[in-house]
Image (cartoon, rainbow, N blue to C red):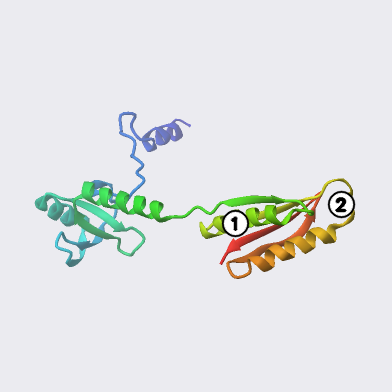
Amino acid sequence: MLQLLQERVIARPPFNAPPTPKTDGPRVNFEIDVPNVRLIDAAGENRGVVPIREALRLAEEAGLDLCEISPNADPPVAKILDFGKYKYEEQKKAAEARKKQKIIEIKEIKLRPMIDTHDYDVKMRAMLRFLEEGDKVKVTLRFRGREMAHPELGMKLLQKVRADFDPVAKVEYEPRMEGRQMIMILAPR
């Protein structure tokens, strides 16, 4: 029993040992814990497979950092570079990618089965503007009271909308009844 406790105490790390830091990005300098790396020097030339100690020495002589570029390769690929500059460039690339990203929204147009022609034209101009901006449009046709007895009027109106927007939009969600309303979703072509 005493021997088992002594083994457990020996196996446990000392209390004053610093915790290993967890980083989000690539491992740098002494965080790289493999015996050999495929080294790319500061000039961008492939030095081949070298021991990690030699790679760290070369990086220190150049006044730069050893950064693990491809950790899943066998052996991992490490490059001698200025890590601060590398992180800055990566952040710039990520920000540029976020800026170019377009978030598609779903805009909603509400109609009634007995809509007047002028009101219909106004709604269709707004719908065309939404589609040109690259957003999807949800066309909601609400039925009230006795209008529920004539869903064919609503289907006829949604088919007219579909025909009017056929050159600029495609139907993503076919017209169907959901409770007291009929819904159709159009997406830009």
Is residue 149 placed above or below 1 in the rendered structure? below
Give the amino acid at mark 2.
Met
Residue 118: % across, % down: 68, 54
Label 2 vs 1, first from the N-terminus = 1
Quick one: SS at disc 1?
helix
Q: Nearer the viewer, residue 132 or 57?
A: 132
Position of 84 with respect to 4 (left or right) is left
Q: Nearer the viewer, residue 82 or 17?
A: 82
Q: Nearer the viewer, residue 40 or 106?
A: 106
State the mark number for residue 148.
Answer: 2
Q: Which residue is mark 1?
A: 125
| Residue shown at 25% from the left, 60% from the top | 37
| Residue shown at 33% from the left, 39% from the top | 21
Q: Quadrant of the C terminus?
A: bottom right
List the single residue furthest toward the bottom.
167
Position of 11 with respect to 58 (left or right) is right
